[in-house]
Image: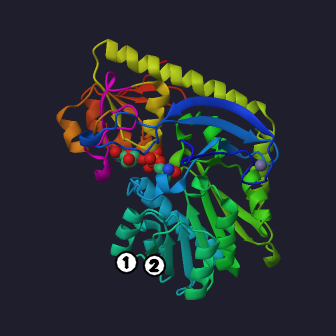
Amino acid sequence: MQDIVRRLDTCRVCGGDDWLEVTSFGSVPLANGFLDPADVPAHEPAYPVDVIVCRGCRLMAIRHVIRPDVLFRHYVYVTSESDQMIGHMRRIVGWCDRRAGLAPGDLVVELGSNVGLQLALFQERGQRVVGVDPAENLAEIANARGVRTLPEFFGGDQGRRVAAELGQAKLVLGRQCFAHIDDVHNVLDGATAVLAPDGVLAIEVPYLVDLLQENQFDTIYHEHLSYYSVHTLGRLFESHGLRLVDVERAAVHGGSVVVFAARAEAGREPAPAVAQLHSLERQLGLLDDEVYLDFGARAHDVIAQVRDLVRGLAADGKVVAGYGAPSKGTTLLQFCGLGPAELRFCSDTTSLKHGKLLPGTRIPVRSPEQARAEEPDYYLLLAWNYAAEILSKEEDFLRRGGRFIIPIPQPRVVAARPAAAVA
Ligand code: JHZ
Ligand code: ZN
């Protein structure tokens, strides 16, 4: 385990070492470690998921850090082309334009740019774009669609190299990747190296407030090293001469926050929304210990409820399957101890996952077409962040008497109409 895992002893944001031990979800295999049925290892390595909070800067983190190349060099998560996500990416363009004032020819750099869907929207408007993403398989797809992408981890060297070659960036964007980064100082070093004097750094992360309030324990897995509040991000950015100038909350991935930062010397006044979120976080107790401990206790309670509900249904002879095979779903099933005895399969739209087995639980992944041939009585909605879109897409399944179980914040069963609350 030594070479793959590092124990986080000092805080990656503030360097402190006074940790609150929040809770442990035990040891599980990597959430995106889908298995090839022809090549199932005798023993799947598992790593602890222990949640800690730094008392210095209130960073919530997991204790065990997996080497990034193991997680991200080949990546199966492809940015969703769902209506919700496309709509969000268009909104991101507008939000960034409003803060950075993007003219044709301006440079936009995106970290963790995946297959380039977001950058393509900037490119359409005449911006020059470059993405940096360590997943070689995804960078190849992005380059093939005409979005220039470097298959690398972003850091100081990459920032300086892009600046030398393409000039300074009006916008440096990182969507849903910042929480995956261990050496955040190196990444901010790169971002500030390439950022124009009047440029904007926009970072989108799942929002800690939503995670705590909605019991999103299944978003805690090895890829997600950090769970950020505005408080902690603001403090981190300050240490790199950056100031938060605005924030937006967004519904994606169960509730996210987009923070916009500018160079402190640019002298921009923060919008009122920044102070509003700071005070919300203070009010909710994010600067104290209890709120985290309460979350840990609730999470274990929900895990037990989901497990009992699904096991009960399976024991009654109902066929249950998973809807989606997201990382959070493989995590939820592991934490709940649910396997092929309870869930016959998971259906997922991502072709890279088809025919594979879920890490740890070894539940097979099927395409939606295959799934329709053997419809279950209940779908456990693992991709709950797309609940509205999926429930309306699956109206026929519901009308035929099928049901969905939405696991969080508390498990509830959804039927065609009227919606019944259970458990
Ligand atoms: P989705 C990913 O988490 C991984 P995941 C990553 N670590 C991260 O940080 C977060 O995103 C933010 C499927 N699906 O997007 C597609 C259907 O089958 O919630 C996906 O496999 N039918 C980068 O993996 C999964 O569900 C549908 O109709 O939890 C959703 O995964 C829809 C809409 C989705 O990400
Ligand atoms: Zn800290």
- Which residue is located at x 63 percent, y 80 percent? 160
Label 1: how many Cα within 10 Å (few below 14, some 14–19, many 20+) = few
Residue 123 circle label: 2
Q: In the image, residue 168 lies at what x, y percent?
A: 63, 84
Q: In the image, residue 400 lies at what x, y percent?
A: 24, 29
Question: Which of labels 2 and 1 is toward the front?
Answer: 1
Main secondary-structure element of the magenta-colored stretch:
loop
In the depicted structure, whether residue 304 falls above or below residue 59:
above
The colouring scheme, among rainbow, by chain, secondary structure or one colour, is rainbow
CA gap, disc 2 and disc 1: 9 Å
Does the magenta run of residues contain 352? yes
- Report the amino acid beneath label 2: Gln
In the depicted structure, whether residue 184 falls above or below residue 289:
below
**Closer-to-camera residue (381/327):** 327
Q: In the image, residue 69 lies at what x, y percent?
A: 49, 57
The residue pinned by badge 1 equals 146
- Which residue is located at x 32 percent, y 21 percent? 341
Q: Which residues are magenta?
A: 339-362
The residue tagged with tag 2: helix, strand or loop? helix
The answer to whether residue 366 of the structure is visible from this angle is: no
Direction from residue 291 to residue 181 in the image, left or right: left
Direction from residue 13 to residue 141 in the image, left or right: left
The residue tagged with tag 1: helix, strand or loop? loop
CB within 8 Å, label 2 to label 1: yes
Label 2: how many Cα within 10 Å (few below 14, some 14–19, many 20+) = many
**Residue 272 occupies quadrant:** bottom right
